[in-house]
Amino acid sequence: MGNSQEPQDFNTSVMPSSLTPVHVAKAADGLNLYDTASHQVSHFVPLRPGEVGIYVCGATVQSSPHIGHIRAAVAFDIVRRWFLKLGYKVTFVRNVTDIDDKILDKAAAAGQRWWARAYYYEREFTEAYNTLGVLPPTVEPRATGHMSDMIDLIQRILDNGHGYVVTDADGKPTGNVYFDVASWPHYGELTHQKQTAEVDEAAAVADRMGPSVDATGDDKYNPVDPADASPDKHDPRDFALWKAPKDTDPEDARWSTPFGVGRPGWHIECSAMSHRYLGDGFDIHGGGLDLRFPHHENEMAQTRAAGYPSAARWMHSAWVTAKGEKMSKSLGTGLSVPSVLAENSAWVVRYALGSVQYRSMLEWSDQALVEAQAAYDRVSNFIERAGVALGGQPSREEVTGISADDLPTDFVAAMNDDVNVSGATAAIFTTIRSGNTLLSQLADRADSEAVQAEVRETLLAVRAMLDTLGLDPLAEPWVSAGAAGGASDGTTETPEHAALEALITEQLNARAEARKARDFAKADQIRDTLAEAGITIEDGLQGSTWSLK
């Protein structure tokens, strides 16, 4: 019965980068991350030197991805990229839930095979991840491929006295197996059911808005699984490890086990697959805030009750909200990724989704997309102008080869502060402003070669910081996306940019003459007219520079 093989080291078996030496940056010493279980930001120390194991709950592939789903994917992609930039070897596991009541019910209603529906929407999610620059996981296991792992894990829980099998009148197993919460005194430690300590404001927000054992009553975001509402349970808190099939379930959605025919409960798959691919204990378990309870609370309990360590740290990305309400397909407020991408470039959408720290609620609006487009204009404008001035761009190898130790200190400090993306983005635009000033000095400085070297160093830093956030416009997938997400490499100036440069330079020259003649009203009028057109003017000792807002 089951699969008794020990979990593989997937860094060795599927990741070519594992063959290269690990050189962890000194900057890693300053990394601090929040832990949902402790409600505290604390210093990060990996369980294994030089390596980080991360498991993130992926999609239940019942229908098309919406912005709320992809926000979590982008948030943990940025976390992962920062670990990579710090020099860690990262094993990143993201599962696919491809067997579930919602999948079965929606497939039946549409006259589809359940597995065909699941695979169709799994590919839609993959396309969304790829389009928005989310790195592929080290491994992406499906629930249906790990039934033997789940059966083995359930058996361990039963053998350890922390679960029970429901039998019929003849003493035969019905297929229903429940976790015995009363037998596990640690239940509630993730969401602090028995909490007495005062928590921070972020945790308080999570408790007010997110499902939690602290908040009683119906949960409109995670309705109770019918199996978990069964009268067969010994305790209302008990949850399904394995479920007897519904009469409507197709024959190919049932598996035979020693405790009856059925299919897995919602939570058991993640415990089984995280152990399969990350072994006995791993560094970080991530997911959306709405998974905090009951999913992750139950997952932590059953993993430990089976005799395995749970994740050392739990991280949860906050929701995408619309007018303060969680964006949710079940509530009719979901925006599908294809519909958003039909009206906005992929770079802009990714920037908007990753524009705030992962623990902050992200209010989705037209204004957020307008601001993201403005950010793209500023970024691409600087990268293009710098490339023209230098006669070309640094190679991708140079950009990716920059260590965290060589990035601007304010960027590193922000990323080490619980992945504070807002602060990191501010550091990027501070550096861009400095680069624009340097570009304005090239024509006026006798030591133009020295200034060119400074411009190149600044350009390299900007692109390396952007790349850490998955936003270097000259990287994939933005390059292949062309106008939908890329910037010019700077080897040739685009006609549009050349025309804009000529027009603005003429206005700046006229403004300089007006200021020389002490006609400040005219000078201010020129500045204000450019500002209304989205052009920012910065005056310096060497003259005025411009950039897009």
Image: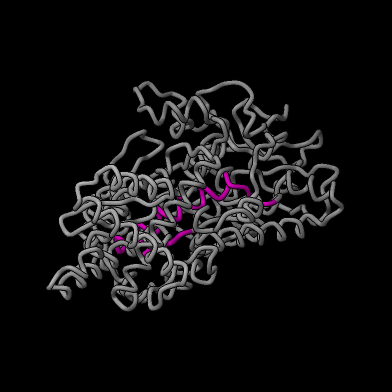
- In the picture, which quadrant includes the N terminus? bottom right
In this image, 401 relative to 225: left or right? left
Q: Residue 22 placed where, x, y %?
A: 29, 69
Q: Residue 313 placed where, x, y %?
A: 38, 44
- The number of numbered badges drawn on the structure is 0
Q: Main secondary structure of the magenta part?
A: helix
Q: Residues in magenta?
A: 64-92
In this image, 473 relative to 395: left or right? right
Q: Residue 357 placed where, x, y %?
A: 40, 43
Could you tell me which residue is drawn at 46 percent across and 50 percent down?
Answer: 372
Give whichever of 218, 370 is nearer the camera.
Answer: 370
User: Does residue 78 lie above or below 291 as drawn?
Assistant: below
Q: Residue 452 placed where, x, y %?
A: 21, 72
Colour mapping used in the image: one colour
Tell me if I can see residue 161 in this picture.
no
Give whichever of 255, 29 is nearer the camera.
Answer: 29
Image quadrant assignment for residue 12: bottom left
User: Does residue 174 lie above or below 213 as drawn?
Assistant: below
Residue 236 sits inside the magenta stretch: no
Residue 70 sits inside the magenta stretch: yes
In this image, 531 relative to 31: left or right? right
In this image, 364 relative to 143: left or right? left
User: Does residue 366 lie above or below 450 as drawn?
Assistant: above
